Amino acid sequence: MHRLIALLMAVLLLAGCATSPPAPAVALPALRLSPASLGQELALQQRLVFRHGAHQRELDALLEVDAAEVRLVVQAMGQSGVRLQWDGRELTQQRAAWLPASVRGERVLDDLQFSLWPLDAIRTALPPGWQVTEQGNVRELEHEGRTWLSRTRVDAATLHLRNHAEGYELVIESVDDGGDSP
């Protein structure tokens, strides 16, 4: 879970580095799942690699999830870029002045939940016309027969997220998962 959150933050940071990013091809649905619906507690330290076009950025993230709250801190070069807290009702974020405006906490939360939360929890949050499927190590979010978001579990410690709607990729690698894996 922490990997996913970290990955999402990295993607958003990288997207912010690009000049005049194009408008998304489609608006991805907001998930806004409760922290408890994850079904477990997580405490993860992650290394994120965000790619958007020719830009690539590496970030560090700390993710904690319990039944009451999701907490994420993303750092670059030892400086905190963003802190997110989600209690199932309200998303609170603290952002560094240097963080690009295009890095949206809402998108980070949605990417995190898409990557880590159980499939059934995601299905219940999707609006009509959207489907989520999972075959083997690949999870996909589809609309009108097209995949707009995909997550591949590369190995026990690594997730690869592709946001086809906004044109970025995020690789999330857990550095120390304390026995919990995403």
Image (cartoon, rainbow, N blue to C red):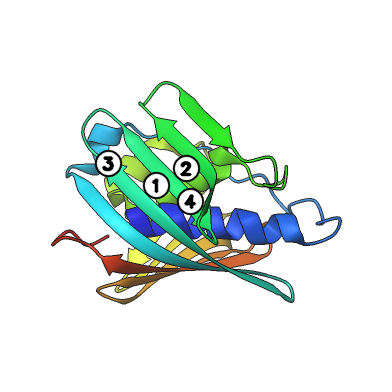
Q: Which residue bears the numbered disc 1?
A: 113
Q: Which-is-in-front pick, marks 4 and 1?
A: 4
Quadrant assignment for the C terminus: bottom left
- Give the residue type that dot 1 points to: Gln
Label for residue 74?
Answer: 4
Q: At label 3, which amino acid type do we have?
A: Val
- Viewer-proximal residue among 29 and 51: 51
Q: Nearer the viewer, mark 3 or mark 4?
A: 4
Could you give the CA–CA distance between mark 1 and mark 3, rounded to whole angstroms?
11 Å
- Whether residue 132 appears in this view of the structure is no
Residues at marks 2 and 4 touching, judged by CB atoms closer than 8 Å: no
Looking at the rendered image, the disc whose residue lies closer to the viewer, 2 or 4, is 4
Q: Residue at x 24, y 50 (%)?
A: 43
What amino acid type should be assigned to the residue bearing mark 2? Leu
37 in relation to 75, above or below: above
- The 10 Å Cα crowd at callout 1, few under 14, some 14 to 19, many 20 or more, is many
Residue 65 image label: 3
**Are dots 1 and 3 in contact, CB under 8 Å?**
no
Instruction: Return the disc, 1 or 3, that comes first in the chain's sequence.
Output: 3
